[in-house]
Image (cartoon, grey):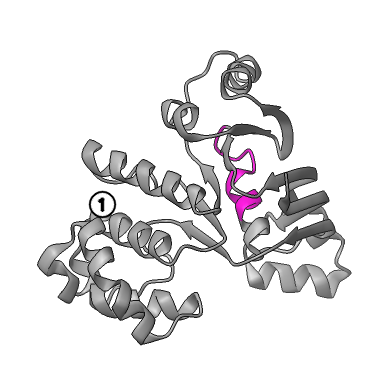
Amino acid sequence: MTPVIVIEDATLSFPLDRSVARGAIDLIAGGDGATKRRFTALKGINLQVNQGEVLGVIGRNGSGKSTLLRIMSGIYRPESGSVRAVGQTQLLAGVSVGMNPNLTGRENVHLYGSILGHDKKTMDGMMDDILEFSEIGGFIDLPLRTYSTGMKGRLGLSIASSVEPDILLIDEVLGVGDPQFREKSKKRILGLVEASGTVVLVSHSFALMSEICDRLVLMHEGRVAATGDAKDVIAQYYKLTEGGSS
């Protein structure tokens, strides 16, 4: 198997105090306070994602799942260790990340596409497919702010999957929409993989993960607690959380 993402001993922390003014005071005072008030989100992560793989990431809220996707995408850089990715990587996180609520759905297709490095002509060529898949209909020419949460999610997933990046990172978006759309989404993701794409998926839906993922990673307190077969990793999740629900 060919690795397309390699993470080696990656650690990342964030300030606990979000007050810019308080942080400035601490720095003037010597910086010790600002240094101490940090939360280590990822602790010595070692992980490899292989080409053509659907990798699922599970864990309780605050375990480091979303942060892990963000270092894979390059949004965050680890303080120590390294992250290497081969090919175009696209992160789909939240139902309207990368989109402007005051622009129409069609304008947001062009905007989102430009973020991914595609020109207007290219995105226009994908428009029919995006409309068909998203089921947005006539709303495509209305401002995004008029969309429901589900509509935003369907549009975002439609755009991200239509451009077919080499590596698609999905953070809790695949479950948007009704059961019929969720089934369409699963088939779309599997289609990407069949086209030699790679998908890393964060979700609380263990049924979904068991169905479409080749392998699961369990995050716990900023560390990789387990990797492997879905059944075994989900069992480890419940063991760590003492039978708590997902």
Q: Nearer the viewer, residue 5 or 194?
A: 194
Give the residue type that dot 1 points to. Answer: Gly
Q: Can residue 213 be spotted in the picture?
A: yes
x and y percentages locating residue 184 in the rendered image: 29, 44
Q: Mark yes or no: residue 108 visible.
A: no
Helix, strand or loop for disc 1: helix
Q: Is residue 111 above or below residue 186?
A: below
Residue displayed at 57% across by 24% down: 230
Judged left or right of residue 49, residue 242 is left
> Could you tell whether 157 is left or right of 221 in the image?
left
What count of labels does the image hold? 1
Residue at the front extreme, as displayed: 195
From the top left corner, tell me how far across and down residue 48 is, in percent.
74, 45
* Location of residue 135 in the rendering, given as x and y in whole percent from the top left corner: 18, 57
Question: Is residue 176 shown in magenta?
Answer: no
At horizontal 26% and vertical 51% (from top left) the residue drawn is 150
Q: Is residue 62 one of those drawn in magenta? A: yes
Question: 214 left or right of 127?
Answer: right
> What stretch of residues is rendered in magenta?
60-69
The residue indicated by pointer 1 is 150
Image quadrant where residue 86 sits: bottom right
User: Is 241 above or below relative to 28?
Assistant: above
Within 10 Å of disc 1 (Cα), the crowding (few <14, some 14-19, many 20+) is: some
Q: Is residue 207 left or right of residue 108?
A: right
| Residue in front for this viewpoint, 178 or 30 | 178
Q: Picture coordinates of residue 133 (x, y %)?
A: 25, 56
Position of the N terminus, as image quadrant, is: top right
